[in-house]
Image (cartoon, rainbow, N blue to C red):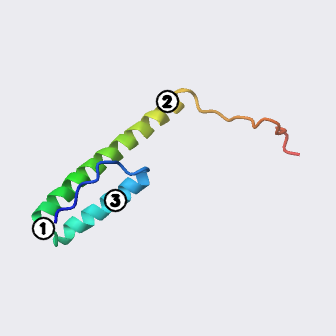
Amino acid sequence: MVKAVAPTAPPTFEAALQELEAVVQAMEAGNTPLEESLSAYERGVALLRHCQETLTAAEKKLQILENGGLRDFDVIGEDSSDS
């Protein structure tokens, strides 16, 4: 019986990466029938795209933060002297 490809992305980048690693390991073992291998490959591609998109979005956020001028900040209510 062929397993259905899960249509949704994992809730976190780390979960997606972990699932992708499991897919790769299963495929490298070479013990799955062709149809299951194709489904696993399809799932792997979807997971890879999800991870790439997540990393791209994080990179863009970092660029925005850096362009905004990273600087030290004072915590409200904290005295700036070192006593």
Label 2 packing within 10 angstroms: few (<14), some (14-19), many (20+): few
- Left/right placement of residue 28 relative to residue 16 reads left
- Mark 3 element type: helix
Label 3 sits on what residue type?
A: Glu
- Left/right placement of residue 25 relative to residue 17 reads left
Label 1 sits on what residue type?
A: Pro
Dot 2 or dot 3, earlier in sequence: 3
**On residue 19, which mark appears?**
3
Q: Are marks 1 and 3 in contact (CB under 8 Å)?
A: no
The residues bearing labels 2 and 3 have C-alpha atoms spaced at a distance of 30 Å
Which mark lies nearer to you, 2 or 3? 3
- Left/right placement of residue 7 relative to residue 1 reads right
- Mark 2 element type: helix
**On residue 8, which mark appears?**
none
- Mark 1 element type: loop
Instruction: Point out residue 6 in the picture as x, y percentages from the top left corner.
Output: 28, 53
Dot 1 or dot 3, earlier in sequence: 3
Above or below, 70 against 10 in this view is: above
The image quadrant where one finds the N terminus is bottom left
Instruction: Point out residue 17 in the picture as x, y percentages from the top left corner.
Output: 36, 56
Which residue lies under the disc numbered 1?
33
Q: Image point 16% across, 70% down: which residue?
A: 30
The residues bearing labels 1 and 2 have C-alpha atoms spaced at a distance of 46 Å
Which mark lies nearer to you, 1 or 3? 1
**On residue 64, which mark appears?**
2
Residue 15 vs residue 61, the one in the foreground: 15
The residues bearing labels 1 and 3 have C-alpha atoms spaced at a distance of 19 Å
